Each structure stands twice: as C-alpha cells, then as structure tokens.
Image: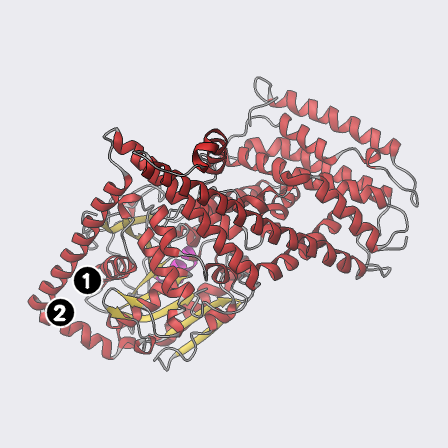
Amino acid sequence: MKGPLGFNAEDLLQETLAMQRKLMDGLKLLPAVDDVDYGVTTREEVWRDGKVTLYRFVGTEPPVHATPLLIVYALVNRPYMVDLQTDRSLVQKLLALGHDVYVLDWGYPDRSERYQTLEDYLLRFVDGAVDHLQAHNGGEPINMLGICQGGVFALCYAALRQAKLANLITMVTPVDFHTPDNMLSHWARQVDVDLLVDTLGNIPADLMNASYLMLKPFRLNVQKYVGLLDILDDKDALEDFLRMEKWIFDSPDLAGEAFRDFIKQFYQGNGLMHDGVRIGDATVDLRQVTLPVLNIYAEQDHLVPPDASRALRGRIGSADYTESSFRGGHIGIYVSGRAQREVPATITGWLNERSQ
Amino acid sequence: MTTAGSGSGAGDVEALARQYFSAWGDALRHAAAPPGHTAGPEGQGNWQQAIDWWAQMMPNAASRPADEAVHRFREQAGGWYGTMQQVAAQFAGRDTTSAEVAQAWRTAVLGQGDGLLQWMLQGARGHTHTEGPDLLQLLETLQRQLGPWLQSPAFGPGREHQARWQALLRAQQDYQAHSRDYVDQIKQALDDAFTLFEQRLAEHEQPGNQLTSARAMFDLWIDAAEEAYAKVALSEPFQAVYASLGNAQMRLRAATQQEIERLTESFGLPTRTEMDAAHRRIAELERLVRRMAAGAAAGAAPASTAKVRKAAVKPAAASKRTTRASRPANPTKATANPNKATKAAGKPTKPRKRSA
C-alpha cells in the first residue's frame, strides 16, 4: 500500500474487535467502580482562620526532622493533589523521609470572601500559619514549600518575612510571567480585569477551568476521553482516571480582589521581574530573599513554562540557590512514578545539606 | 446515566451485550474484505453507534464519577471514534495520498457540524458557568419582542429606562460581533490544523513509517491540531480578540445585572451591590483589626521579636537538629477521614480559632 496509512481491512477489523472487547470489559468494570476517595494520609487540624485551615499530616513514624515543612498550594485547585492516593502522594513520601509536613488549605471562598486581597492571603493566612508553627517550634524559623501559585506566594512571603523561614522550596512556580510560550499570560494581557472582577465578584471555578482546558483543547477535551477506551479493562487505571478528573474539576471559586491583584501584578505587570509587586503597604523585593532556595520545575510544563520558573535565578539575594528540573508536566510532578521517586528525595537531600 | 440498566440485573445486561457484540463481530468477519481491498464503513460496523449502544446498556454505575465518565466518553469521544473509523475504512488496504486522507478527514470532521467542536466555541457563548441561563438567548428574545421600542429615540418619563435598555442592547450587539471574531480565530486554527495534518501525514508515507491503525491516525491529528492551535492562540491578533470578547461579555453581563438589581430593588429585595458593600466593610475592618493587633503585639513583646531576628541571622542553624523529634500529637485521635473538616487533635499544636 502506498500512502500514509499502512493498514488494511483485516487490521481495521482487529481494531474494531479489540474495541469491542474493551467495551465489554468496561460494561462489567465501570458499574463496580466506587466513588473515588482522595487525600489518603491522616491529618489533623492544628490552626484555623476563617475558612483557611492548617493541617498536620500524621505519618506512621514520628518525624526525624524537627523543623516543620509547610506546603503552600495554589488557590485555583484543591491541595489534596499532594496527597492524592497511596502510590501518588508527595506527602507520604516526605513523611516517610522523616519530615513534619503541614499543608495550608484555603477552603472554598464564597461571596463573603470576595474582598480578600493578596495581603490577606499572605500576611493574614500564611503569616498566621507560620506564626503558629513557629510558636510550636521554639520560635525557630520553619521550612516552606510553595507550589505553583503557592510558590509565588511563598517567594513574596519570604521577601517580606524572611526571618520566619529557614529554607524555601518553590515547585513549578512562575517568576517571569511574560515568557513567549506562556499562553495563559498571553491571553490575560489585555483582559480588563477590573471590569471582570467588578462584574463577577468572585471568579467562578467553571470559568477558570474552561480557560485551562482551552490551553490544549484537543488533548484535554477530546484525546483524553478517547483514551478512556484503553483503560476500560483496568479497574485501578479507571479509578486513577476518575480521581484525577475529580481533582481537576474540584476547583474553588477565586476571591475577586485577590484575583484582581494577582492578574494585574503578575500576569499583566510581570511584577516579580520588575520589582513591582506590592502586598498591602509593602513592596516585594526578591533581593531580600537571602535564605537558601531550591527551585524545582517541570521540563514539559504547559502551564508554567520552564523559562518562567528558571527566571528566579539571579533575581533573589540568596547566594545559596539550587535548580532542579524534572522530566514531566505540571501535573506529573505530583503524581508520576518518576516524580514520586525523585522529587521528595531531592527535597530531602537538599534540606539535609542545609541542616548539617 | 439511567438507561437499560434500570430494572435489569447485571448478568442480563452482560448477556445482552455479549450477544450484541458477538453478532456484530460475526457480521464484521463476514464483511471484512481480504487484504488489499477497500473496506467500506458499513463493513466495519459503526463505532459511534457501538459506543452509543454501549452507553445505553451500561447499568447504573456505583458512583457518580463513573456515570460522568460514561457520559463524557459517549459525548466527547463517541463522535471522534465515528470520524476516525469512517475515514480509516475509506482508505484501508488501498493506495492513497496524504492529500486524499487529509481531505477526507477535513470533510468528516467538518461534517460533524458545530456539535463536535462545541467545546472550542464555548468561549463565544457567554456562559461563565457551565450550567445556568443563556444570557445571549434571553436578550435575543427580548430584542425580537421589543425591537421597535428599543430602536426609537428615548423621551418622556421613561426616557432613562429606555436609554438604559438601548445601551444593554448595544452591549449585546457588541458582544455578538466579538463572538464572531473569536469564532473566526478558532476556524483559522482549525484550517491551519488540517493543513498541518496533511504535512504530518506526508511524513508517514515511507514504508515502515506508515500509520498502522485508525487510532494512530487520530493521534497524529491531535498533535497537528494542538500545534496549529497553539500558534494561533499565541498570536497577537488572538490576544486582542480573546480580551475583546471577554471584555464585551463582561459589559453585557454588568448591564444585565444592573437591570436585574433595579427589578429586585423595586420589590424591596436586598441587592448584590448592598451585600458587596457589607462584605467590603467587614474585610476592611478585619484588616484594620489585624494591623492593630500586630502593632500592639510588636510593642508588647520585644523579646520574641528579638528572638526571630536572631534566627534570621543564621537561618540554616535553625534546622541543624536532625535528631528524632517526638511527635506531640496523639495519632490515635487524628482524623480518620481527612477529607472532612476536622477538630484539632494535637495538644501542643492547640488550635487557635479566629472568626472570618
């Protein structure tokens, strides 16, 4: 046969029959798939301010490292991505490596939280949680792990309250929001965010999800569901798929004023690159970040392109700056097998070197 | 999904499905042409119909996510399976060219109409929630009903009201114009995708490098479509069109909300503006109290401040302790279900609650 298609009618028949078998298996398996569970590690609430809750994860063994490790996650999705399931849990790996792990859960903002600003998120909630952890750590500084937007928060917080932190780890964190491959930022550039927030109040999760899906519309809206056929005979894979779907679309609405702040200062103003970020009355100066920083980024990240993360190099005051790249995408860095092996070990090794 | 499964035992459904697929398989084997001959789509059965039938046969799933997976698989993948099978069957086992396959693919995709690409055009439809009233449709109805009145010069006691409604109508027309611009961009991306698909197909014309299944052809299309779309989506014109559409949508929505507020206010109902004003005041007061409390604490506890400053001088020193730390919390009291709001269990990490 000449041309790009190298299959004949018999091949197509076999493809059809294989499809049949998958559908048959799915008919038996799918009805038996229970509602997916997520967030596998036992945790306890240790502090709360409004809807924001600080949880401590409980490992099977007491922590070896005394310094608390606080995970600060993004506002746009739920933080249980770091503890999705037993074999895909950054938290469990960190606990197993002896860390005392905490996560700040932002909750689901409602209309009454519409006027919460970045100042509230950083200097009320993050600072409140850090104060609490410090108070129970003999007043000593703690370690912080900021992820994605939470990494931006962590950087700003470190610039404003550096004395409260011992070490800072940023993961898939954008610093330069104007790299040419940053589609989300490209779209946001001319959006009238004042009009948007004044009209909508809080930003609906569905609107945010629609925007994310349009970053790769063919893969995320079509190919992903076409591929569902491949796993109709695999209960574990089906449950993994459903769990991931749950996380992707379990998105909180975003507090309007914080969203306005974030879009204007970061997506539009690219403030971290121009020393132009203000949190409340304070200006964020990354040169004030002189503590050790580990910056982990994903090499195939379509949400936070590698160059957006790597821009941190040379912008902070710290002489102790380490970069670590991970082969995978924005989500893979939490859940892939490679990530489970490499990321917690990298964090632990780096922290251990700084606690000698 | 509540279809054939209702009232039927799982065994009955499985037997029925087995019967259906068995008959289908037999029909395919008889219809399959020998290698080297063309197989018509009818000879391969209809993949989309098979998926439709399968979804109808699916017994009630044990969980909502599984039900949703069936729904999405049918809605978002079924049509594409039909498309790939239709094109693959057209060329299976015969000589062809990349141009022929690409043209057939274009015809098949476009032949599915807007339904298949609905998700691509969703942004142009005025929804900020996936469910909810279609503002555009509502206003179009209103425009038809009130057309002449809205076009005439406003005067008299109702002048202000009429002028407002005319402005609302202009906002709607403006939004429709921007929607068309957006659709044009998407169509451009699709057009480019078909061209790129042909080029990608041409790269597979060499023996040994041919595509060996309908699914492989589909995956190649997805790659080409994403690449072409990304190029358009990262262009300056798209940025402008995207922002203009979003801004026009917000102007229309704001004008609509204003009218709704006027209506509800006339019935003595509290409006969103009033609620927002109260929420804003509460947020400002909370911020003020926090600043005052922080100021008071700073003045009252110089010793603790000094301790923090001291820690800041040598942050790494703080994490020197690598000895096994005792876990203060009682794990047995920890939350069994980490997904639910929890009560604090850790004694030393006593919860400190603050009202929102």
* Residue A190, x across and y down, in percent: 45, 60
Q: Disc 2 sits on a residue from what chain?
A: B
On the image, which quarter does residue B289 sit in? Answer: bottom left
Chain letter, disc 1 residue: A
Near-viewer residue (A322 or A108): A108
Please give the range of residues in magenta. A91-99
Name the element at disc 2. Answer: helix
Residue for badge 1? A135
Q: Depth check: give the residue in front, A256 or B248.
A: B248
Residue B308 in the image: x percent, y percent? 19, 72
**What is the distance, in whole Å, between disc 1 and disc 2 at their CAs?**
10 Å
Q: Residue at x 43, y 36 (%)?
A: B150
- Which labelled disc corresponds to residue B304? 2
Q: Which amino acid does label 2 sit on?
A: Ser
| Magenta stretch: includes residue A95 | yes
Q: Horizontal placement of A152 versus A218: left or right?
A: left
Helix, strand or loop status at disc 1: helix
| Kind of residue indicated by mark 1 | Ala
Task: Look at the image and name its color scheme.
Answer: secondary structure
| Residue A228 falls left or right of residue A174 | right
Q: Is residue A65 magenta?
A: no
Q: Are marks 1 and 2 in contact (CB under 8 Å)?
A: no
Residue B215 in view, yes or no: yes
